Amino acid sequence: MAVVIKTLQTPGGKYVYDRATHKKLRVNDDEYASFLRIEAGTVSESDEIVLKRYQDQGYCTDSEIEEIRHPASTLLQYRLDSRVAQLTMQITQDCNLRCSYCAYSGAYENQRSHSKKTMSVKTMKKCVDFLMERSREISEVVIGIYGGEPLLEIDKMQECIDYINEKYTNRGIRYTLTTNGTLFDEDAIRILENNNFDVNISFDGPEELHDANRVYADGRGSFNDIMNRIEYIRENHPKLFSKISFLSVIAPGVDYACVNNFFVATDVIESRTAAVNTVSQYSAKESVVYDDLYYTTYTYQSMKHLLAAVGLYDKSKTSKLFGTYIGGVKRFYEGMAKNSRLLKTAHPGGPCVPGVMRPFVAVDGSIYPCERVSEGSDAMKIGHIDTGFDLQKADELLNVGKLTAEECKNCWAFRECVLCCAASDGGDELSRELRLSRCVDSTNSMLENLKATCLLQEYGCDMSSL
C-alpha cells in the first residue's frame, strides 16, 4: 500500500493531485517540497507530519485498489441486450481515393487493405434488426454509414432506409455518414437530405496540403472535386449543408497554421464546424513522428482557448479546429468535482463499453467495438451479426487494464487513463507490452488537463460557464 499522488506547478501556484479523492490541492512551497519527496519515496520525519495533516482531512490516503475490474462488467450482458445506442455499418471496403495515411493503405499491422467487398442488403437489414432488438431502453438510436467510401453504394443505402421506414415507424432514428466528399450526385444529395443525415466530410484544408495525401488511385488530387460539390450543396441544398461538418487530418510535416487559416477564411466552409485529428500511431508498420512545430502549434492554439476562456483573448480569433479543446477540459473538471473515492475494485479510465457505445459491423457481419480498431485483429472481434455478441470477448476488452494490473494500481493517472483496447491490440491477442509502451501518452494527457484547470481557476474562471 502506498500514497499515490502527482505534484505539479503552474506559473501561478503549486499543487498536489490526490488520486484517492480525484482532487487537486493547492499547497505552499514547504508543503510542495515535502510532497515531492513523498512522491519520490524518500520521506523524512517532517514530511510525514505534513502528510498526516492532509490525511486527517481525508486526502492522500494509501491506495485501496486491490483488484482491476471494470464496474460495467456486472451489467454487461444486460447492456448488450437492451442498451445498444448506436451501430455503424461498413457497407463497402472499396474507395475511389487512395489517401496516403489511410488505415487501409497497407501501412498498418493486423488491418485489411482496400478491397471490392461490399455488405449485402440482407446483412444491412440484419444490422438494423440487431440494433433495434438491443436498444429497447434507448429513445433514439444512431445508425452510422461507413466505408471505404459509402456513397459508392448509394442504391443499397436507399434500400436499407426504405426497409427501416417500413418496419420501424415508431422508433427514433438518426443517421450519420462519413464520406470523402467526392461523390455527391443528385441521388446521394436527395437521400441524405430527405433522411436528415449528419454528414462528416474528410477534408484536409488548402489544396496543396489536401492533395499531398488525399488522392485518387491515379494520383490526382481530390481538392477541387470536393470544393465544387460543397459549393453546389451550399447554394442549392441549404438544409443538407447545415448538417455538414469537417474532419481534417494533420499528417506529419503539415503546417497546422495553414490548415487552420483555410477553415477560418474560406467562405464556403467557414460557417460549418470542423475538427482536427492526427494520423493513428497504433499498429503502424513505420513510426508516425510529428515534429516540434506541430507540438509548439498545438500548445499555442490550446493556450489561446484558455486565455479566451478567462477573457484575455478574443474568442473569435481562436482556432475552430480546436473547438472541442475547452469542452474536454470542462469534462475533466466536472469529473474532478464529483465527490468520489476509489473502491477496492476499480478499473482505469479509457475503455468504452464494447458493443454498447458504438459497435461497428464489417461487410462480412463481424462486430468490433468501433470503426477505429483493426478489422484484421482477432483480439478486437466481439461477435457476429448472425450469432450476436461474444460476451467473453467483450468483457476481456472492457477489462483490458488487467493486462497491466500492478502498474495500474500504482499509477497516478489511473482515473483519467485514455488507453482503450486498441492501444493493446497485438493481433491474435491483447498485448501487455504494447499497453505499457503507451502509458506515457495517457499520463501526459492527464497532466495537460490538470494544468489547464489550474490555470483557469487561477484567473478566476467560472468553470460552469465554459
Image (tube, rainbow, N blue to C red):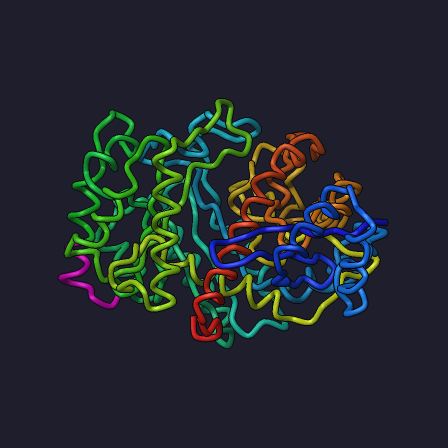
Looking at the image, can residue 389 be seen? no
**Residue 414 vertical placement versus 283 (above, below):** below
Q: In this view, does 186 lie to the left or right of 284?
A: left
Q: Decide which of 41, 102 is in the foreground and name it.
A: 41
Main SS, magenta residues: helix
Q: Residue at x 43, y 36 (%)?
A: 279
- Residue range in magenta is 231-239
Q: In this view, does 452 lie to the left or right of 249?
A: right
Q: Please check the rendered image and state whether residue 237 is part of the magenta-colored stretch, yes or no.
A: yes
Tell me where residue 12 appears, x and y as whole percent: 48, 59
Tell me where residue 124 appears, x and y as whole percent: 50, 52
Quarter in which the C terminus is drawn: bottom left
Looking at the image, can residue 408 be seen? yes
Q: Is residue 433 left or right of residue 199?
A: right
Q: In this view, does 51 lie to the left or right of 359?
A: right
Q: Please check the rendered image and state whether residue 248 is part of the magenta-colored stretch, yes or no.
A: no
Q: Residue at x 79, y 46 (%)?
A: 43
Q: Which residue is drawn at 55% across and 61% down?
A: 332
**Residue 174 vertical placement versus 345 (above, below):** below
* Rendering quarter of residue 460: bottom left
The residue furthest top is 286
Tell me where residue 383 appears, x and y as whole percent: 67, 46
Tell me where residue 97 appears, x and y as whole percent: 31, 34
